[in-house]
């Protein structure tokens, strides 16, 4: 008898197993996270009252020589509101601004802006360039209010019903396509809902 032990049979597939598992997980994450419409990310806040966060006004923003007010949660009661979280440094916000200005012509709703981590001069310049669709602009200088609203990133738009509850959330910019096919449909639903 020999003192040498019989070598264990080689299993090359066993050495490849971690690579195969990693590739499978990568594919699942890629197709799972990359697929679908990101604007339809569900919000845990749908059906719940809008966050009771008061925000200061954007200093120096006037309409008809009167300071545009900051955000007071009581402003949602009895009105259908479209709340848009925006910033002057946000490239898609520039694209959606003219569409929000057009939407503000619908006097059945109020358009509320939450200005996210922006410099006041830049925010006023932004609204001067595109027009101010907002009847209310609250300044979220530290981003705390946006966290309470469940914002993933700017821009995001919410429809708040007359009861003060969030009825819909649109992640990403308002576009000509989703304005007509999604946002206006959700606004009409909120307008038809019993107060």
Image (spheres, rainbow, N blue to C red):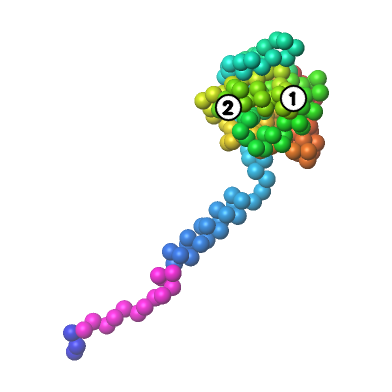
Task: Label 2: state its secondary structure.
Answer: loop
Q: Which one is in front, 74 or 157?
A: 157
Please indicate, yes or no, whether residue 114 appears anywhere in the rendered image.
Answer: no
Nearer-N-terminus badge (1/2): 2
Q: Is residue 176 magenta?
A: no
Q: Work out whether 80 lies above or below 182.
A: above
Q: Which residues are magenta?
A: 4-16
Q: Point out the image quarter for the C terminus.
A: top right
**Mark 2 nearby-residue class (10 Å; few <14, some 14–19, many ≥20):** some
Q: Point out the image quarter for the N terminus.
A: bottom left
Q: Which mark is residue 131?
A: 1
Q: Residue at x 69, y 34 (%)?
A: 94
Q: Quadrant of residue 12?
A: bottom left
Question: Residue 37 location, x and y as percent?
Answer: 68, 45
Does the magenta stretch mainly form a helix, a strand or a loop?
A: loop
Question: Residue 66 location, x and y as percent?
Answer: 70, 10
Question: Residue 7 location, x and y as percent?
Answer: 29, 81
Q: Residue at x 80, y 20 (%)?
A: 108
Q: Quadrant of residue 89?
A: top right
Q: Residue at x 64, y 15 (%)?
A: 60
Question: Residue 55 location, x and y as percent?
Answer: 58, 18
Q: Residue at x 67, y 37 (%)?
A: 92
Q: Which one is in front, 62 or 47?
A: 62
Q: Which mark is residue 118?
A: 2
Q: Is residue 181 left or right of residue 75?
A: right
């Amino acid at each position: 008898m020999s003192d040498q032990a019989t070598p264990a049979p080689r299993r090359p597939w066993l050495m490849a197993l971690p690579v195969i598992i990693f590739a499978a997980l990568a594919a699942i994450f890629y197709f799972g996270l990359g697929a679908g419409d990101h604007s339809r990310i569900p919000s845990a806040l749908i059906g719940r009252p809008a966050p009771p966060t008061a925000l200061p006004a954007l200093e120096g923003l006037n309409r008809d020589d009167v300071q545009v007010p900051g955000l007071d949660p009581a402003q949602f009661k009895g009105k259908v509101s479209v709340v848009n979280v925006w910033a002057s440094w946000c490239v898609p916000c520039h694209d959606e601004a003219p569409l929000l200005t057009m939407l503000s012509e619908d006097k059945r709703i109020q358009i509320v802006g939450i200005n996210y981590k922006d410099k006041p001069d830049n925010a006023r310049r932004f609204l001067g360039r595109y027009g101010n669709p907002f009847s209310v602009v609250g300044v979220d200088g530290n981003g705390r209010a946006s966290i309470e609203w469940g914002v993933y990133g700017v821009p995001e738009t919410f429809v708040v019903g007359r009861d003060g509850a969030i009825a819909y959330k649109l992640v990403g910019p308002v576009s000509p396509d989703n304005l007509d096919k999604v946002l206006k449909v959700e606004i009409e639903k909120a307008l038809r809902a019993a107060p």
